[in-house]
Image (cartoon, grey):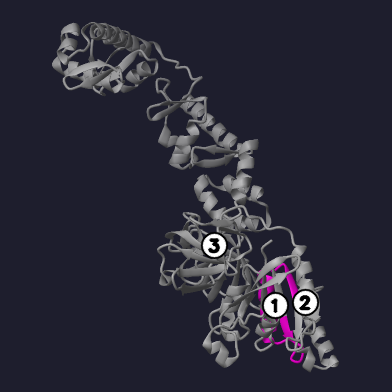
Amino acid sequence: MALVIGTAGHVDHGKTELIKALTGIDTDRLPEEKDRGMTIVLGFAFLDLPISGRVGIVDVPGHEKFLKNMITGVYGIDVALLVVSADEGVMPQTEEHFQILSIAEIKKIIVVLTKVDITSENRIEDTIFEVQTLFENTIYENSEIIKVSSKTGQGLDELKQLLDKTISAMPPKDVTGIPVLPVDRIFTLKGVGAVATGTLINGTLRLGDKISIYPRNLVSKVKQIQVHNDLKNEVDTGHRVGLNPANIKTEDINIGDIISYENAFLPTKIIDVKIQPKSKIVLKEWMRVKVHILTDEILGRVALLGDGKYCQILLERETVTWFKNKVIIRNYSPEYLIGGGMVLNPVPVRHKRKDSDVVKLLEIRENHNMKEIILEEIKNKNWKLEDLKKTLFSPNNEFDKTLQAMLNSGEVKLISKYLTDESTFAKIKNEIIQELESFYKSSAAIKLGILKDELRKKLRLEAEFFDALIYELPEIEIVKDKLRLKTWKMALNETQLKELERVEQLSRSGPCSLAEFDRETINILLQEKKIVNVKNDFFIHMDIFEGWKQILKNHIETNKSMVIADIKKLFGLSRKHTVAIAEYLDEIKFTKRTGDVRVLY
C-alpha cells in the first residue's frame, strides 16, 4: 500500500537530520541549503519498512519565511512526524505547523523529540508537557511521543517499528476516480526532459494516458513514470511520483499545477468557502489573503456572505479545485495563519452579500450528504446536469455514483439535459394543466390553445427546460406555437360550425389561399387533419391531397418517374400551385428530386 510520511516542526529542530538518520538520504540538495544549514525547499526520500514496504518521505522547511513551501508539502501526507527539539520545546513554528496539519486533516501525527542525548530528563519532561498541552482537546491528544537522537541512534528503531505498525494498520486507499497529481517540484532530467513530481492523491496514471496540466489545460500524455527511482508502467493513489509529460517544457509547468485527465477540471477565479478562523481572528470584507489549494498559493480577496459564516474568495488568477476540497488561508500582510477552509462551490457566480438563498444552500452543502444536497439544489433551480456536476464535482466521482443511484430509484428525473425530482415535476405538471384549464374557461372556445412562450413566462421557467418538460407530459398536445390538453373539446357555436363547414367544402374544390380565411378556423381544420397546409401559402382538403398522392404514385410506378408538367396535366393546376405541390411532396419525403425528374422516395 502506498503511503507518504511528512515532517513538520520549528526550524533547527532536526527534521532533516532525522530523515537522514532513518534513510541515509540527505534531503537538503541545494547549495544554499548546505551553506546555511537550513531546509528551504521540499526534500524527498524513502524508507523501507518490514511490513509496509517502501514509503515516501517529504521533508519540509521549518523557517517561517518558507511556510509556503511547508504547506505545499503537507498535501498527500498520511503520517506526520512533528519534530520538536527536546531542549527548546514547543516554538512558534511548532504551533503553526501543528495547526496546518490539523487543517489538512492529516490522519496520524507522531511526535518525535529530537536531541534527547544533549537534554536533561527534567527538560524532556517539560517539553512533553508542552506538546500534550498543544494537542489537548484535539483528535491528536493521544498521539505517541518518541524520544530520538539522530546522532546516537537512540529511539530510531522504536520509531521505525511504530511507523511500520501505524502504516500497515491503515485502510487501503480508494484508487478509483480520476487521477489528481498536484505538482510540488519541477526539474529537467538529461535525456528525458521535463519532470513534474508530486504525491498522487487520487486515481491511477498509466504510460500513454492522455493528460492535461491545469489550470492552463496544456494537453500532453504520460511519457515516463518514476516511483522512488524505479520506472513504472502505472502508479496509483498515495505514491510519490515523478512524471515526464510528452512535448512539455519545464517552463510550461508551475508548482501548484494539477495533472489529471483531459477535461477533468474547470478552471475558476471564484470559490465559495466556509472558513474556520483561528480563535480571535475576525474575517473582514475585502481583506487580501493567501489561499493555499493543494500545492498552489494564490492571492485573493474575501467577500463575506450573510453574517460572515461563509464567503466568496475572488482569486487573482485561475486555479482548479473541487467540492469539499480543503484550503488553508493566510493573511497577505503581515503574514499569519487565518485558518482552514472547505470549498463548497468551486465554480460559483458572483453573489450578493445579503442573498439568503445562497447562504441556505451553502449550509446544506456543508452539512448534508450528496443525495440530500442534490435534492435540495434541484428543488431551488432547474439545473442542467452538466452545470450541477461542475459545482459538486470531486475526483472520487461521488456525484456521479450518487446521481446514478437516484435516477435508478426514480428519486430524480433527467428531462433532456435537466434534473428534477418527482415532487417538483408533479408540481410543474399540475401548474401547466391548471393554466390550460383556466385558459379554456376564460377564452373564446375556437382558440386551439395558449401560446407556449406565454405559459412559460407565466410559470417563470427557462425556455430550454420548459420545452424539454412539455415532451414529458402525455396529457399535452403541441400545436405549432401553442399548447392544449388532449382531452379538450371545442364547444363551437352555430356560426362557427357553419364557417368550418364552408371552408372545408371549399378546400375540396382545389387549392385555397390562406390569406382569404380566418386563421383560427384554418388552425382547427389543420388540427383535425381535415386540410393540408402547402408551403404556408395555400391549403387543400386532406382527402383530395391523399387522392392526388395515390394518382401520382401509380403514375411514377408506371412511368418510372415524373416531371412537374405531369402534375399540372393530371390535376389541371396553375404553374404556382404545381411547383408548390411538387416541392411539398419532396419535403414530406413522398418524392425525391433528381435533376428535373422525381421518383418515389
Find residue 516 and report its horizontal and vertical position in percent.
23, 19
Closer to the camera in the image, 51 or 292: 51
Residue type beneath disc 1: Phe
Magenta-highlighted residues: 83-110
Q: What element carries label 1?
A: helix
Judge depth for marks 2 and 1 and give the one in front: 2
Instruction: State which tag comes first along the sequence, 2 or 1.
Output: 1
* Tag of residue 159: 2
Q: Please state the horizontal and vertical placement of residue 129, each as a whole percent of the image.
A: 82, 84
Answer few, some or many: residues within 10 Å of disc 2's Cα (few below 14, many 20 plus, some between 14 and 19).
Answer: many
Q: Can residue 188 be seen in this view?
A: yes
Amino acid at the residue labelled 2: Leu
Name the residue located 82 percent from the left edge and 92 percent from the top edge: 123
Q: Residue at x 55, y 70 (%)?
A: 295
Marks 2/1: CA distance? 19 Å
Q: What kind of residue is marked 3?
A: Thr
- In front: mark 2 or mark 3? 2
Q: Is residue 107 found inside the magenta-colored segment of the image?
A: yes
Residue 321's label in the rendered image is 3
Residue 65 within the segment the image draws in magenta: no
Q: Can residue 138 be seen in this view?
A: no
Q: Please report contact status of discs 2 and 1: CB closer than 8 Å, yes or no.
A: no
Do the numbered discs 2 and 3 sit on residues whose CB atoms are within 8 Å? no
Residue at disc 2, secondary structure: helix
Looking at the image, which residue is at 54% across and 50% down? 389
Image location of residue 360, percent across then percent down: 62, 56
Mark 3: secondary structure = loop
User: Which residue position is annotated with label 1?
Assistant: 98
Where does residue 524 sit, x and y in percent of width and height?
Answer: 37, 18
